[in-house]
Image: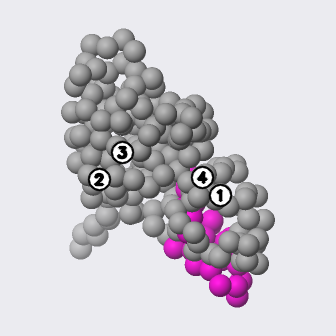
Amino acid sequence: MTVETPTRFSPLAAWRDELAQLPAGLRATELPFLTQLTLRVRPGSPAAAAVEATLGITLPGPSGSEMAGDVKALWMGPDEWLLVAPEGQQDDLAGKLRAAIGDEFATVTDVSAQRTTLSLSGDLVRDVLAQGCAIDLDPRVTPVGSCLTTVLAQAPVTLVVREEAASAVWLLVRSSFATYLATWLVDACTEYRGSTA
């Protein structure tokens, strides 16, 4: 009897080489399999305080993000946050949060398989994204730490301006839209081929 073991692969595994060949001034890397937990809790409640104490973080307000250690909290709505951490931490992190919440009213749901993350950096990031995004990406409007849910080239994404620099972003995209978004990104870079930016 043969036992088959499922093989996990990332939504953009076939795009590694293509993404590595984007023009100078734009680096794109998939960050597959990140831990992603949806947290639903009323701000200011005892459950929210327990979560903040456990994470060592203040849950961010509208359009914001906060980071403590390896965990990044992204504001997704008035009572919803996405907690992002390195691969494989979902069970441990969810367990700690559920233990801290106890009988208080809140939910922690593992959504790690729902999205993949594209990490973009370089001087061309904002110019390329502006081709498909209606949000004003000027650093004065979307500074470091911004977290915005938007549509990029007709694909729903969560755009996070990273702490490293205003020219470093994460695009969290549903796995089913990832190939489409990678195709768009490669096409949007066409005019920059040969650029030394």
Badge 3 crowding class, 10 Å Cα cut-off, few under 14, some 14 to 19, many 20 or more, is few
* Circle nearer the N terminus (1, 3): 1
Q: CA distance from mark 2 to mark 3?
A: 12 Å
Residue at x 62%, y 80% (from the top left corner) = 106
Q: Quadrant of residue 41?
A: bottom right
Numbered disc 4: secondary structure: loop
Looking at the image, do the residues carrying marks 1 and 3 touch, with CB atoms under 8 Å apart? no
Residue at x 21%, y 33% (from the top left corner) = 187
* Circle nearer the N terminus (2, 1): 1
Query: At label 3, which amino acid type do we have?
Result: Ala
Q: Which residues are magenta?
A: 80-109
* Circle nearer the N terminus (4, 2): 4
Q: Quadrant of residue 131?
A: top left
Instruction: Give the quarter of the figure containing the C terminus.
Output: top left
Q: Which mark is residue 134?
A: 3
- The residue where tag 4 is placed is 64
Q: Which mark is residue 60?
A: 1
Badge 2 crowding class, 10 Å Cα cut-off, few under 14, some 14 to 19, many 20 or more, is some
